[in-house]
Image (tube, rainbow, N blue to C red):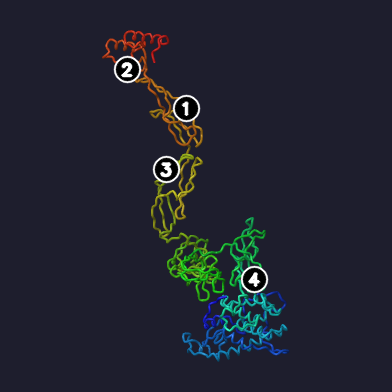
Amino acid sequence: MSRNKLGVKMIAIMLCMSVMIPYGAVATGEELQDSTEPQSQSADSTTPQAQTEQEPMKVSDELLRVLKQLEGFNPHAYWDYQQWSIGYGSKCPAGYEMYYSKVEDGGQGHQISEEYAEELLRGELDYFEKVVNNFITRHNLTLSQHQYDALISFTYNTGYAWTSTTGNLVTAVINGDIGSHFIYGIMLWSMAGNRHILVNRRIVETNIYANGVYPADVYADEATPDRYRIAFMDGNGGTVKYDEHGFDAELPIPIKTQFKSAPTGPDETGAIVTYELDGWYTERVGGTKVEQLDSSIPTGTVLYAHWKTPAGTPVIIPRQESGLKITVNVTGENVNVRSGPDTYYYSLYKANPGETLEIAEVVSRGGLLWGRSGDKWIALKYTDYNDALSKYLPMWGKVTSTTLNVRTGAGTDYALVEGAQKKQGDLILVSDWKSDGSMMWGKIEEGWVALPYVTFEGVKSPDQTVQSIEITQKPDKLSYVHKVDALDITGGKLLITYMDGSTSTLDITPEMVSGFDNTNVGTNTLTVTYEEQTATFEVQIVKAKVIFQMEDGTVISEKEYLFGDTVEIPEDPTKPADGNGYYVFSGWDKEIVTTCDGNAVYIAQFEQKELVGDLNGDTFINDRDVLYLLDHVLFSDKYPLKGTGDMNGDGFINDRDVLYLLDHVLFPDRYPLPN
């Protein structure tokens, strides 16, 4: 296991933050079990009792050496949650707090020596020796020196409260366990300052307790054997009672984590139910189910709860994303990408320069800023995060919830800003973001808002964000033939009004229009959408018209048809004879489509024929034509013929033709004219 070696001074400050002074101190994190014993001692029982039957045990010099390394030396006084501490995490002597503090803290900058620090440490250890000896006597235990030493180190760090509980650690010690049950119990006390910064110390203490190994260097790899591991449990929509699970990789242990609450959601019928645990898996969605912790689980692994409905149907609980994602580039070589936001989480792989990650959440852990991409975490100091952030923020977002509270700080513990509540659709300008450990928050002018209820995708500034649209000019084409005509929005105009009150005019484009349906005759309402705003206009879907007409436009027939209907063809039309002859119908100007496929116009076509016998061109054949033919025979230049004059078909035009035409007028059936 590789760990970053913190400076002695920083380790002392962080570790001492978790030291509980022996008066009124209560360590958190221990899981209590059902028992008839009280959960905490009475006022009398908190005072260590004298040993009666066996010689009280004392810490060894080896433990003293290791403890000094674990605590680290600080020559100045510093505030440690509930007390002033100094030296090796000891309580600062009364009256000397400011005297020993640093100049920048208002003191005189005096320091204590390591010899005096050890004297203070031994003085406090006298007290904790009595606490642990009382615990031994109360439970009639026999402990080895290294087991006693490990419990002294643990108690000095966390306080004596654990000795008064009936939780997992107490049970493991009483039962003589030196494997997974012991390390599970002691790892429940691995947090300080809301971080698991005591994981390595707990492993060192476990190694001393179980194996009698006092490391020469508590920061060396061999000081924390790989067999002692810790996994972190993600409720994945539920809330776990404890999110850590220590175990001995060589002694498998079933997962013991309990839940404070389970997620709720719809079941197979749509009713809202409380989901049931479906097991622990290596991935948030999918992955491998894990039922016991063993050597297959690397230290720092995150295991995710999977859920199902009471009827057994698996469900997926979506992660609550912030809405804002910042793309960063990895700049460091072989950068650990971890399962969680700190160095004690499992390294999933090594990232190298050029890899890009979308960061959706940022938290501060162990003096580093960590960014989450999906379920992966990276220390942002090894990326171009600062440059990337400066390009993204400030950024305009849009509120997606019905209402959104504005708070004085980044978290639900902060007070509401009166009169600053936002409503759905409001634009906000986010200038900074930070996590409260459960979600990302964005800083706006009035305060802080929860970013999961804000979207940034496609959101523009007020002078670019559309507030409303209006159709100021409808398209030129508003009538469409059933199942034939395609949408044509030429000529349509939109008036765009922006959030800041400014306006502009745009042509309506095809991609803006939806709802066009020419399959049903009648009114069709079309929707124009632009930047999430809408307006509507109506068009008419009509039947096709099929027209049959004469050359002069005279309509022979006109009917309406649905697409696919059979077209009715009228009887052949006729055209009256005129001075140029008579006419015979020859067909239509184009081939008739008998199944309607749209509007159509068909024009009748006629062939002109000579009207034999109509010699004067008045479209009649009578005695006038007989006289005209006689005039032509006598005076051909003055009486030209309008047609042929050879009435009897002998190839000549003479008096015989005059007589034949007269016979035709009198007896047309007996004297037919030539064609």
Task: Identify residue type, mark 2.
Answer: Lys
Rounded to the nearest angstrom, the CA distance separating label 3 from label 4 is 74 Å
**Element type where label 2 sits in the image:** loop
Q: Is residue 381 left or right of residue 120?
A: left
Mark 3 or 1, closer to the camera: 1
115 or 259, which is in the foreground?
Answer: 115
Report which residue position mark 2 lands on: 642
Rounded to the nearest angstrom, the CA distance separating label 4 from label 2 is: 120 Å
Q: Where is residue 541 drawn, in percent x and y?
A: 48, 41
SS under mark 4:
loop
Query: Which residue is under mark 3?
Result: 477
Q: Earlier in the sequence, mark 2 or mark 1?
A: 1
Q: Which numbered disc, 3 or 4, marks the residue closer to the eye?
A: 4
**Mark 2 and 1 residues: CB-CB less than 8 Å, in contact?**
no
The residue tagged with tag 1: helix, strand or loop?
Answer: loop
| Residue 409 appears in the rendering | no
Residue beneath label 1, please? 570
